[in-house]
Image (cartoon, grey):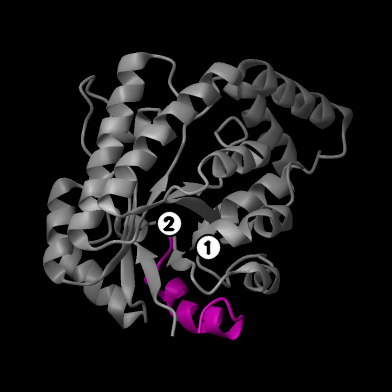
Amino acid sequence: MYQISLSTMWAKGRFSNMAKFVATTRGLGFSHVEANASVSPQGLNELIQTSIPISSIHCPCPAVLSSKGIPIANLSPSSIEKSEREEAVNFARRTISLARKVGAGAVILHMGEVPIDLGLEVELRQLYQQNLTQTERYKQVKEQLIYQRASQASPYLEAARKSLEELSQYSQEQGIMLGLETRFYFHEIPNIEEMEDLLNEMKGRPVGYWHDVGHAEVQQQLGFASHEEWLSRFSHRMIGIHLHDVIGISDHRPPGKGNMNWEMVAKHLPCRATRVCEIAEWNEEKQIQGVVNFLREKEVTN
């Protein structure tokens, strides 16, 4: 039987301590948890003390402040500012060390972003919400977004490569797999072509693909790479998957509460992949009841 985890994303602001989260998690039928990037140092200690198995850790974890006083999750491993990139890598190393300490098998990485005019994607998503995807304006905004990203990506991709090279060496020493995650926003690294390049460059290293069903589905809804293309291209390199449902371009809903094509997901899902439900904190407990059985019925897990 596959293990199935619940991300501590759902615990945010919901429980007074992680022991209560773990008790609820087990009651909902989950066997493991994933430590999310929003877990505080105290929450992480509480989680470890519960002794529930930690399948994976979403980098960076725990949530602390950087040397600049900003959340470490805001540091980018693709930054062309040397100090920021190095600090992002150092915190990622700490997360890898944590994974080894608690017996987690993988660390999920966000590789950064290309800094473009974010107003373009805001407008694109607003047009989508207004059912204006077939308009000339939608086409124009999408083309501008693609052009801006392509024209500015090079130095940020190079910085991301450097960070991944350093982290892969460290993860090899620690015996921890790194999972490069499908991203939610178009300006984030990697897009589908960059994912292929990074994975090819990391052959022989402990680096694999971490599929996020919601992120891939939203990218498809907006008219970028298809969800199934992500799966078919990288299923042979997949080490884990974030499972959640989507309505339109709103994700992180409990599986079964949206429009996800779960049969398509199951078709491409390798047995070895770690399965994690990444459900946002605004979902009520009653909406999560039955999720594990639903995923078994869809043959996403067993």
Label number found at residue 244? 1
Q: Is residue 204 left or right of residue 23?
A: right
Q: Mark 2 vs mark 1: give the one in front.
A: 1
Q: Residue at x 61, y 38 (%)?
A: 197
Q: Is residue 262 left or right of residue 133?
A: left
Q: Is residue 20 left or right of residue 248?
A: left
Mark 1 element type: loop
Check if mark 2's residue and mark 1's residue have beta carbons within 8 Å: yes
Q: Residue at x 25, y 54 (%)?
A: 99
Q: Position of residue 200 (x, y in %)?
A: 59, 43
Q: Residue at x 30, y 41 (%)?
A: 170
Tell me if residue 223 is in the magenta stretch.
no
Q: Amino acid at mark 2?
A: Ala
**Segment tinted magenta in the rendering:** 283-302
The image quarter containing residue 114 is: top right
Task: Tell me if residue 195 can be seen.
Answer: yes
Q: Position of residue 76 (x, y in %)?
A: 40, 28
For label 2, the residue is: 280
Q: Amino acid at mark 1?
A: His
Task: Count neighbours of disc 2 (C-alpha within 10 A) and say few if under 14, some if 14 to 19, many if 20 or more.
Answer: some
The image quarter containing residue 28 is: bottom left
